[in-house]
Amino acid sequence: MPAITTRADLEARLRSAAAKLLARQVARAAFSGLAGAALALGLSVVFLDVLPRLLFSVSAGAAVVAGVGVVGFVVAAAVQWRRYRMPDLHDAALAMEARLKHDTGALAAALRLEESSAFFRPLLVRASDDLQMAEAAPAPVLIPTRRLVLIPMLALAAGVAFVAVLNAVPPEGRAPLAVAPQDDDRAAWADIDVGGSRSDSDRDAYRHALGMEKTAATLRDSAKTLRDANASADSKRQALEDARKSLADAEGDFEGAKATELPQNLPADAAEQAEIAKQLEAAAAGLGAKAAELKKSKGGNSEDSGESGEFKVNGAERKLVPFPAIALHPEELPAQSLAAQPPARRAMAQRAMQALERLQDR
């Protein structure tokens, strides 16, 4: 390095030293951020993915885990910068003097002394020599050896764990209620109603029965209008038209009356109107009885649902989860035999064990 002959040369060299000090601080903060990111990423993998997946069959997801790692990097780097002050020329001079075995204080003194002073020139020569020796001396340790070895290993382990999270199959989650069977299995499970809810065929039958009851109510209202002597001719014609439409919709459900049997035009004779009202009332009574029967029979589903503690097998093929071999004494069963089953299965198995205990007590 050329010798320092002016104050400008000294300040230029010290500015370069200050820039190097800043670069060292950036590297130190980046390494601290790497340590914080590795620690946060490893902990988030354990507490946001591994443990929730094992205990509750849920996961926070790779995005949340990565976000925690980024937050850890920012926090650790910010902690490294919290007390750092940007170095000026005086700080750079003190830092360079700290590398010398015998500090003369010439660098710091040369910055404070005016160039017009008689002592400036010999002091500048001494400061130049000290600066050259300081630049040739080894710099302080940037990162301790222990951290230099442990932190990359921690970062590697956290990175491998995060890659495993990315490649892991997303958990299905454990619902608080029994999981409904798939569409192709609904027919096989139609007779089993351990949850107390209606099957698809049962719900369809119930809706059909409600429609039949609505049609019966329309027919009764039409019959009442036709029997009313104070009703106008227009209202009676409208009632007859409503009854014809309702019977046309219900022809596939009840054969007691057909829309084609009703006259197209309203008869003028009150006796004939009363006869039509009688037909409508009979049709309404038949539809009501048919709807009540349909609701009571649950759409033809006469199999035992198991709700009363008993279950009748009808011999149809079922796609059931295999049960472990059940011993004669339920208390000898391992706890995990039922813990792995769905909630509805566990409830049905519990009822079966209670029934077995009642039989043994006899």
Image (cartoon, rainbow, N blue to C red):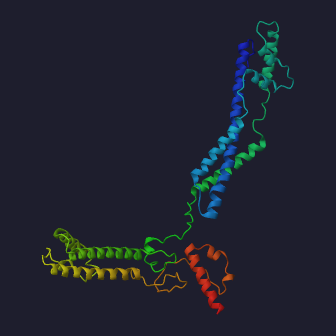
| Residue name at image x 64 percent, y 59 percent | 50
Question: 280 above or below 125?
Answer: below
Name the residue furthest bottom.
362
Residue 111 position within the rendered picture, expressed as x and y whole percent measured from the top left: 77, 16
Q: Position of residue 221 (x, y in %)?
A: 27, 74
Corner quadrant of residue 164: bottom right
Q: Residue furthest right?
A: 102
Q: Quadrant of residue 275?
A: bottom left
Q: Nearer the viewer, residue 151 or 231?
A: 231
- The residue closer to the viewer here, 54 or 148, is 54
Q: Quadrant of the C terminus?
A: bottom right
In the image, is 87 to the left or to the right of 246?
right
From the image, which quarter does the N terminus lie in? top right
Where residue 277 appears, as percent x and y from the top left, is 22, 79
Q: Residue at x 70, y 35 (%)?
A: 81
Task: Answer with left or right where residue 254 lies relative to residue 15.
Answer: left
Answer with left or right where residue 310 lies relative to residue 259: right
Is 195 rendered above or below residue 126? below
Residue 226: x %, y % from top left: 21, 75
Residue appearing at x 63%, y 88% in the figure: 358
How many marks are shown on the rendered structure?
0
Does residue 144 appear anywhere in the picture? Answer: yes
**Residue placed furthest toward the left:** 268
User: Up-down: is 289 above or below 100?
Assistant: below
Give the camera-side residue of 7 and 308. Answer: 308
From the viewer's side, name the closer residue of 262 and 339.
262
